[in-house]
Image: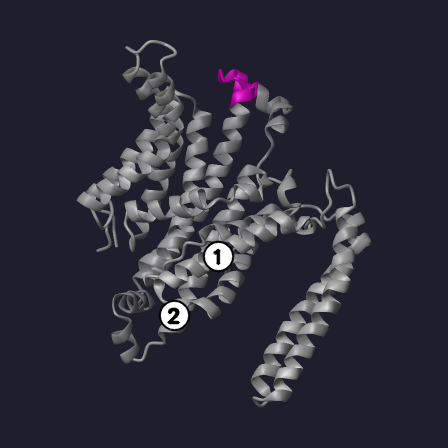
Amino acid sequence: MSLTPRDMLLFVAVFGLIIATGFAQSWNVALGILNMGLVSAIMALGVNMQWGYAGLFNIGVMGFVALGGLGAVLVGMPPVGEAWAAGGLRVILALIIGAGTIVAAVLAWTRLSPGRNRTIAMILLLVIGFFVYRGLFDPGVAAIEKVNPAGTGYLGGLGLPILMAWPVGAVLAAGAAWLIGKTALGLRSDYLAIATLGIAEIIIAVLKNEDWLSRGVKNVIGIPRPVPYEIDLQNSESFVSRMTDWGFDPVTASSITVKLSYTGLFIVVLLILLWLSQAALNSPWGRMMRAIRDNEVAAEAMGKDVTARHLQIFILGSAVCGLAGAMMTTLDGQLTPGTYQPLRFTFLVWVMVIVGGSGNNFGAVLGGFLIWYLWIMVEPFGLTLIEFATAGLADGSFLKEHLLDSAAHMRLLTMGLILLLVLRFSPRGLIPER
């Protein structure tokens, strides 16, 4: 599947808007939009794999994105030695016992004959395992969270290079997708959507409340970077002298240099994923997935294992979302569980896929850039438009003040308007599947 001249013109138009922002406002703003646009495009690719390839309606995107962010913490942050000494081993042992209890209960259910003995064995295993688990877990967590709660109060991570956290975030999301898929993929599409949303909310609730794992709502800050810090560049005599010779302010140049470094890394990841996605889509596997999406009954009659293929694509798409989550947390330099809201990571990504063109990887990428640009720029544009429209009204009038206060809602209005226009005039998206 190649890009037509019309498709390339759409990409040129979107990147032209970002470049125009750099000239009209600042290059820091433009590069910030570009970097998050790259991350958004990767998220949209993940959702497009699930919906565009297989027709799976997943509205728990934010849960997988959050697990990717957790991966950045678990890998990149240094371990907190005092916390590990206080209760780390107890918590790990408790988690192992909890997982072992679940496995033992499953084995008992499958291997024992139905009847009273199986019921008693299940109850004994679960009750005893639960109390042993809580008896180890609660004191361990309390001890960990008492260790400098204002600064740490959690176990920390492995202290490895932060780039290693990106595939780890993808693996965490893929593991969660496997667990969800094994239980929920047999549901009808609307029930699957409800199940994925509920499980995503559970994941976010765990991140918000389990301080020993991710500091909860106190947030994890200072996540290592794969690029230099601005202050290090500003303290570098060679960098300062070079920027001064070129006529640039060293402070502004340092910020732009850091953002450009992130841009380079993100572009490499996006291009690799896009190449792999296109190769998969155009392979016999991709044709099989589209056949299952279009008619599950016919595909199953031809001998295709529909459930297994659905689980496979669900895991792959979730892994891509987890990768994007790890990249975003690295870009932000902090994990803030309270910001993982459905509006930002589910609704917005779905709008990207629908507007760009579901089933088309290039369409998903275009939608990621376009919708993120509008999400950032619509509010200041809307404020300027309202100020112009109300210029003739007296200052302090109720109508003028109300309209100016409503400028923050221009984002939602614009997203709804774009959806209506695209669904009316181009229902298959700006770059439709061919």
Q: Which residues are magenta?
A: 241-252
Residue 4 on image: x %, y %: 21, 46
- Residue 219 shows up from this direction: no
Q: Main secondary structure of the magenta part?
A: helix
Residue at 50% over, 54% down: 200
**Colour scheme in the image?**
one colour
- Residue reaching furthest to the front: 398
Query: Residue at the left extreme?
Result: 425
Q: Which mark is residue 267?
A: none
Counting other residues with Cα less than 10 Å from the Cα at mark 1, is it few (<14), some (14-19), or many (20 or more)?
some
> Could one spot residue 122 in this view of the protein?
yes
On screen, residue 360 above or below 377: below
Which of the two marks, 1 or 2, is nearer to us in this view?
1
The amino acid sitting under disc 2 is Arg
Which residue is disc 1 drawn over? 198
Is 122 positioned to the left or the right of 373 in the image? right
Residue 309: mark in rendering: 2
Q: Quadrant of residue 95?
A: bottom right
User: Is label 2 in a helix, a strand or a loop?
Assistant: helix
The residue at the point 73 percent across, 63 percent down is: 134
Q: At which x and y percent is residue 319? A: 48, 57
The residue depicted at 73 percent of the width and 38 percent of the height is 150
- Mark 2 or mark 1, which is nearer the start of the sequence? 1
The percent position of residue 105, horizontal first and vertical second, equals 62, 77
- Where is the C terminus found, in terms of image quarters? bottom left
Give percent across and percent down for residue 201.
51, 53
Q: Residue at x 38, y 49 (%)?
A: 44
Report if the CB atoms under discs 1 and 2 are less than 8 Å apart: no
Label 1, label 2: how many angstroms apart (C-alpha)? 23 Å
Q: Amino acid at mark 1?
A: Gly
- Disc 2 crowd rating (10 Å Cα; few below 14, some 14-19, many 20+) is some
